[in-house]
């Protein structure tokens, strides 16, 4: 199955009406695991979609995140990043080069938890690590 088709199906599954721009942004995020910013997405897609605007990219990632078709990554203090991988995983940000990497972990739970005084329903789990990546620690 092509990434175009997979992107369109993800949008439909999440209740989002597919458009050329929405499919393109979703496909980009599903195929680029670099956790790009809106500027990066726009700059990379604009040459092939000259009618694309930065506002459209902002509105699209906001809509996709609201419908859980992508995730928002706030590990970078300066920029919001986006992730097309919606599976449960953590993120690692290198403090030297700024790259963000996916970190697979096996025991993330989104089950309700209780303590002595309050009940919580966990709807989202965010786990971030910061340090030096393999390339920068040398």
Image (spheres, grey):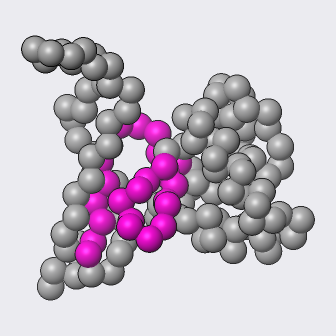
Q: Number of callouts in the render?
A: 0
Q: Quadrant of residue 7?
A: top right
28 or 83, which is in the foreground?
83
Q: Residue at x 28, y 20 (%)?
A: 120
Assign the N terminus to one quadrant of the image.
Answer: top right
**Residue at the far bottom in the pictured view:** 138
Residue 94, how many percent across, how many down?
27, 72
- 131 or 80, which is in the foreground? 80
**Residue positioned most to the right:** 51
Q: Quadrant of the C terminus?
A: bottom left
Quadrant position of residue 133: bottom left
- In this picture, is 95 found above or below 81? below
For this view, does 135 lie left or right of residue 34? left
First to last magenta residue range = 72-95
Residue 72 in view here = yes
Q: In the image, is residue 77 above or below residue 116?
A: below
Where residue 58 appears, as percent x and y from the top left, is 68, 57
Rendered position, 7 above or below 40: above
Position of 133 with respect to 28 (left or right) is left
Residue at left offset 31%, top offset 54%: 91
Residue 101 part of the magenta-drawn span: no
Residue at image location 44% in from the left, 71% down from the top = 78
Apparent side of residue 18 relative to residue 87 in the rendered image (left or right): right
Classify residue 65 by image quadrant. top right
In the image, farthest residue toward the left: 116
Magenta run includes residue 85: yes
Q: From this viewpoint, is residue 44 visible?
A: no
Residue 66 percent coordinates (x, y): 59, 37
At 24% from the left edge and 15% from the top edge, which residue is drawn?
119
Q: Position of residue 126 (x, y in %)?
A: 32, 43
């Amino acid at each position: 199955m092509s990434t175009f088709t997979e992107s369109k199906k993800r949008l439909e599954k999440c209740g989002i009406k597919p458009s050329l721009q929405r499919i393109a942004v979703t496909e980009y995020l599903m195929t680029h695991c670099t956790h790009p910013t809106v500027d990066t997405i726009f700059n990379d897609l604009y040459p092939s979609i000259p009618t694309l605007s930065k506002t459209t990219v902002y509105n699209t990632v906001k809509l996709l995140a609201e419908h859980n078709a992508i995730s928002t990554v706030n590990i970078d203090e300066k920029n919001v990043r986006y992730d097309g991988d919606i599976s449960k995983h953590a993120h690692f940000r290198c403090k030297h080069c700024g790259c963000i990497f996916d970190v697979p972990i096996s025991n993330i739970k989104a089950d309700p938890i209780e303590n002595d005084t309050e009940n919580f329903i966990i709807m989202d789990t965010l786990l971030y690590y910061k340090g030096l990546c393999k390339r920068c620690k040398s």
